[in-house]
């Protein structure tokens, strides 16, 4: 929030005043604006979303928006960047808090990826295919697009790994060690064939000679906070509970859970569960809390209270700040990607959309 005078005004507004002002701004802007909200956003923000979803659902949605000139993306920066890459040229993507970033997305930069790529390509006679998680910068997506690779999300990672193995012999997966490892293990790839590339202390390439997949040593602090002991504790307290965790959790947690599922997979599993079911979930707390509210006939509990503070940065005043700007003819907090980066990143995203 760069406009200090406005910030002062918004922080003095009551919750009711903020809700009314946002509703009025939305009404006045009509179909010229579409608000997208990620599942991990606060309730105070998600209540205004025209569409809510996980990364894959929202990027598909961003590519399909026809009427709106402005797409307000309530999420973290890589998501808004992806919307800017996939939307129509005349559309503008706005992020209410432009500083809201995903730390994991910044654990892999292009220079480090280039080094890993060169050393691993020289190591194996077979072809190396890069796959990057959607939770990565546009620059890294472009790096992958240029080298014949694709993006994946937690909802389609195994499909994209299979796609990569049809195209080549080895995968370099960035930036999440845990999603990469859990996906490879679920596909039956043994541990000895899964290597780790630590960009701060790059391994000797020869040590990875047997690997079919090399995963980047990045992580999500929200999901790696869950422990196997917490899973054991829930089993003790709630025998018969269904335990679902996100595949960004460490493999020991995934191994003890009943199901590892993407964000949309978790939502669907709760919807499908019978009345009276007890479901313990290892993912971001705002989503778990919302599922509790929306399914009062089931007991939905978090493995523990793990919050993404980066997602939680967006509050009603920030949303009002960008919407009021539009009402007044001022476009605030625009997210854009340079054309060359966008072109290659789009290719990597399109490969994912075709393969999934
Ligand atoms: S939950 Fe984890 S992966 Fe998602 S935005 Fe937050 S830090 Fe990044």
Image (cartoon, rainbow, N blue to C red):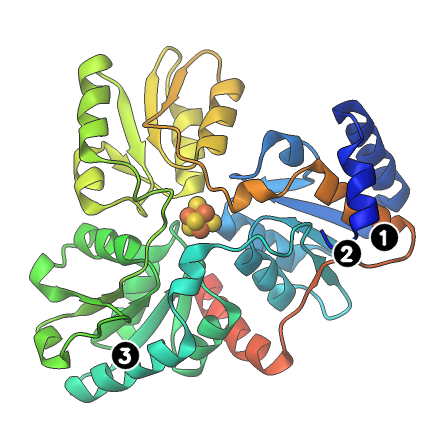
Q: Tell me the element at label 3.
A: helix
Instruction: Tell which of 321 and 213 is nearer to you.
Output: 321
Sequence-wise, which precedes: disc 3 or disc 1?
Answer: 3
* 279 up-or-down from 144: above or below: above
Residue of label 1: 326
Sequence-wise, which precedes: disc 2 or disc 3?
Answer: 2
3D distance between C-alphas at marks 2 and 1: 9 Å
Residue of label 2: 70
3D distance between C-alphas at marks 3 and 1: 44 Å
Residue of label 3: 116
Is residue 252 toward the left or the right of residue 63 in the image?
A: left
| Residue 166 locus on image (x, y percent) | 27, 72
Q: Tell me the element at label 2.
A: strand
Is residue 199 toward the left or the right of residue 252 in the image?
A: right
Instruction: Tell which of 277 and 210 is nearer to you.
Output: 210
Q: Are marks 3 and 1 in contact (CB under 8 Å)?
A: no
Q: Tell me the element at label 1.
A: helix
3D distance between C-alphas at marks 2 and 3: 38 Å
């Amino acid at each position: 929030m760069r406009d200090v005078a406005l910030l002062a005004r918004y922080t003095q507004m009551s919750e009711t005043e903020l809700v009314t002002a946002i509703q009025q701004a939305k009404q006045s802007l009509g179909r010229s604006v579409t608000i997208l909200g990620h599942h991990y956003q606060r309730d105070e923000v998600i209540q205004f979303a025209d569409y809510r979803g996980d990364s894959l659902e929202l990027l598909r949605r961003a590519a399909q928006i026809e009427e709106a000139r402005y797409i307000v993306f309530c999420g973290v920066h890589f998501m808004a960047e992806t919307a800017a890459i996939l939307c129509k040229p005349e559309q503008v993507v706005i992020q209410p808090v432009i500083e809201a970033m995903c730390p994991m997305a910044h654990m892999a930069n292009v220079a480090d990826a280039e080094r890993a790529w060169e050393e691993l390509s020289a190591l194996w006679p077979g072809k190396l295919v890069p796959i990057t998680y959607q939770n990565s910068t546009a620059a890294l997506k472009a790096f992958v697009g240029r080298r014949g690779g694709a993006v994946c999300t937690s909802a389609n990672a195994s499909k994209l790994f299979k796609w990569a193995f049809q195209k080549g012999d080895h995968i370099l997966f960035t930036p999440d060690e845990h999603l990469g490892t859990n996906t490879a293990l679920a596909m039956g790839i043994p541990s000895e064939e899964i290597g780790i590339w630590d960009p701060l202390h790059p391994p000797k390439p020869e040590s990875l000679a047997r690997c079919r997949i090399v995963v980047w040593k990045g992580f999500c602090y929200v999901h790696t906070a869950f422990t196997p002991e917490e899973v054991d504790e829930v089993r003790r307290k709630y025998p018969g509970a269904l335990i679902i965790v996100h595949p960004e959790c460490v493999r020991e947690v995934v191994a003890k859970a009943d199901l590892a599922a993407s964000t949309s997979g978790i939502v669907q599993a709760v919807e499908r569960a019978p009345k009276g079911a007890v479901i313990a979930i290892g993912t971001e707390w705002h989503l778990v809390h919302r599922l509790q509210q929306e399914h009062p006939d089931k007991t939905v509990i978090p493995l523990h209270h793990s919050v993404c503070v980066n997602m939680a940065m967006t509050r009603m005043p920030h949303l009002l700040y960008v919407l009021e700007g539009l009402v007044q003819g001022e476009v605030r907090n625009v997210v854009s990607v340079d054309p060359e980066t966008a072109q290659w990143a789009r290719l990597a995203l399109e490969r994912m959309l075709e393969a999934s």
